[in-house]
Amino acid sequence: MHYIKSSALLAIALASCSLAAPLLEESINNNRLSKRLEDGQYNANSGGTYTGDEGTYITSDSVHRYASGVKCWTDYMLVSQEKSSDGYKDASGPINCASTSECSSETASGVETCETWSTSLNAGIEGEIFSFGVQAGYELQKCHTASSARTCTWDDGKCHRVTTAQEVVVQKGYQRRRCNDKGDYTAWLKDFEHRVPTKYAALSCDNAC
């Protein structure tokens, strides 16, 4: 019968622990990702708009290499950006023309509109997406108050309101978590929408009280 010294057994045990550690970490990270997928937090198949192949690449962040050697990162893809409107909002109080043959409002200022994000991204990523819109020729503003020096005039003896509609650019896209393990694959997708005002607004005089 052959006996192995206790020191040799200890060395084998330590080597086994050393090999198991990265596998354990990988298992924990995979379990966490699976849990988030099950919760629908990042599940592209539970209400996600995109498949992961559309859009223009903007930038990447959140690079992480696991102990097993698997590397993951997050891409930011922009699918569309187009002009829209936040709808008409009051830019004046009631203007009652009942006591005069003609009345007017010379200047109108609407409410302030600021950019909004459907999901929070880090400031650097938000800045790059904003800049992409500027580079495309849109005159974007972080915040803007719709105003006009146009004069609205009425002579019908009725009550009126002046309204303005802020022009906005809507940027739509998604985050794509990619990993490399003997080839690239997509771990999850998550949509985002960015609504940002321009320096333009429409004004309407045709609004009864």
Image: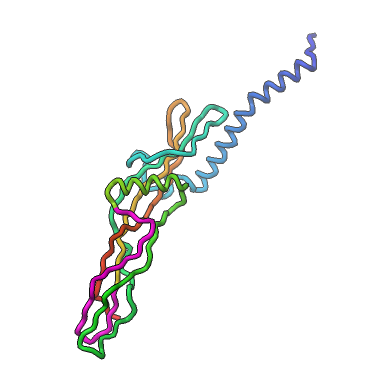
> Residue 23 magenta-drawn?
no
Which residue is more in the foreground, 9 or 208? Answer: 208
Which residue is more in the foreground, 109 or 75? Answer: 109
Q: Position of residue 53 (x, y in %)?
A: 35, 38
Q: Position of residue 31 (x, y in %)?
A: 57, 38
Residue name at image x 37 percent, y 68 percent: 111
Residue 153, above or below 173: below
Residue 45, above or below 100: above
Residue name at image x 42 percent, y 54 percent: 117
Residue name at image x 32 percent, y 42 percent: 55
Q: Is residue 140 left or right of residue 153?
A: right
Residue 91, above or below 4: below
Query: Where is the N terminus found, in terms of image quarters?
Result: top right
Which residues are the magenta region?
139-162
Q: Position of residue 12 (x, y in %)?
A: 71, 19
Residue name at image x 37 percent, y 62 percent: 113
Residue 67, above or below 7: below
Query: Where is the C terminus found, in terms of image quarters?
Result: bottom left
Q: Position of residue 163 (x, y in %)?
A: 29, 72
> Residue 154 magenta-drawn?
yes
Which residue is more in the foreground, 64 or 94? Answer: 94
